[in-house]
Amino acid sequence: MNTDFSAWAVARQSRFEEVLRDVLPQPEIAPQRLHQAMRYAVLDGGKRVRPLLAFAAGELAAAEVERVNIVAAAVELIHAYSLVHDDMPCMDDDVLRRGKPTCHVQYDEATALLVGDSLQSLAFQLLVEHRLSDGPQQQLAMIKLLAVASGSRGMAGGQAIDLDSVGKSLSLPELEFMHIHKTGALIRAAVLLGAQCGHVSAEQLAKLDHYGKCVGLAFQVVDDVLDAEADTATLGKTAGKDEDNDKPTYVSLLGVVAAREMVKNLHAEALDSLVDFGDAGQRLRELADFIVLRKF
């Protein structure tokens, strides 16, 4: 690979922003306010970690970039919808996301609810409108993968557990179970969907799944540490929110030192999952580093 990770990531982030601008409804199309709010919630924000994981896995599997663009967009739309809903007063009641007012603050609660609904629907519309694999059965399996990762056995289920855990003490296995679903499921889906746009064996897919599980958990533990230690300007969202809301976190359970050690171990385990891929796994290795360090 001829480019360093920073150049690779910036190029794909820039290209992907155009993909999102194209797949989202244009702002002048009725209902204009809803479409404008959808674009507000998705565009010009975030590091696009999930799409980058999909692109890296797609390159490993020699996938056509047009296919990966679509699955990356679908995953990012699901992620964006989850943030819109999570920030609403009935959930986390937050006013800042990605350095700007949250969707329900910028627009209103009813519009934010519809934005989330519409983004979720659009994600699955994309998956059925485009050819993503060489066979229909695999494409159906890919659609199911994202559905499970998004629903009650994935992200939404993890959020339900999170809401039910406020003010409670969770064990480490209970906390991991929550975040494997809430945060990890969509990260794993991004890796697996990107790879399945190309050609990988069942054994390779299992190793990529384990990689996704490790980086997904590491992502959440790092989030907990940053929430405890970083300021609002750095995070782009309200710092200290978890502690203020009496939510169980890896920091509250383990302390910062042990949480950082957990990240180190998950990082090593993720890298170990990629050993057999050789140079083809370079970008995924670099993304594991980025998730742990949170800087290019």
Image: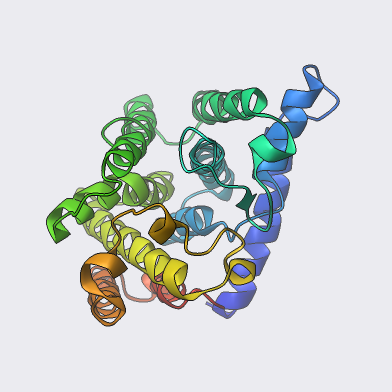
- Is the image coloured rainbow, by chain, by secondary structure, or in one colour? rainbow
- In percent of the image, x 34 and y 30: which residue is there? 151
Name the residue at the right extreme: 28
Q: How many marks?
A: 0
In the picture provided, is 186 more to the left or to the right than 55? Answer: left
- In percent of the image, x 48 and y 32: which residue is there? 90
- Front residue of 36/2: it is 36
In this rendering, does residue 73 appear at all?
A: yes
Q: Is residue 146 above or below residue 95?
A: above
Q: Position of residue 137 (x, y in %)?
A: 32, 26
Q: Position of residue 44 (x, y in %)?
A: 72, 52
In the picture provided, is 248 more to the left or to the right than 72? Answer: left
Q: Is residue 118 above or below residue 84?
A: above
Q: Position of residue 83 (x, y in %)?
A: 52, 43
- In percent of the image, x 72 and y 25: which residue is there? 34
- Front residue of 45/242: it is 242
Q: Is residue 184 above or below residue 131?
A: below
- Front residue of 272/135: it is 272
- In percent of the image, x 64 and y 69: which residue is there? 233
- Front residue of 177/196: it is 177
In the picture provided, is 87 more to the left or to the right than 252? Answer: right
In this rendering, does residue 284 appear at all?
A: no
Q: Position of residue 170 (x, y in %)?
A: 17, 54
Q: The C terminus lies in which quarter of the figure?
A: bottom right
Q: Is residue 26 above or below residue 281?
A: above
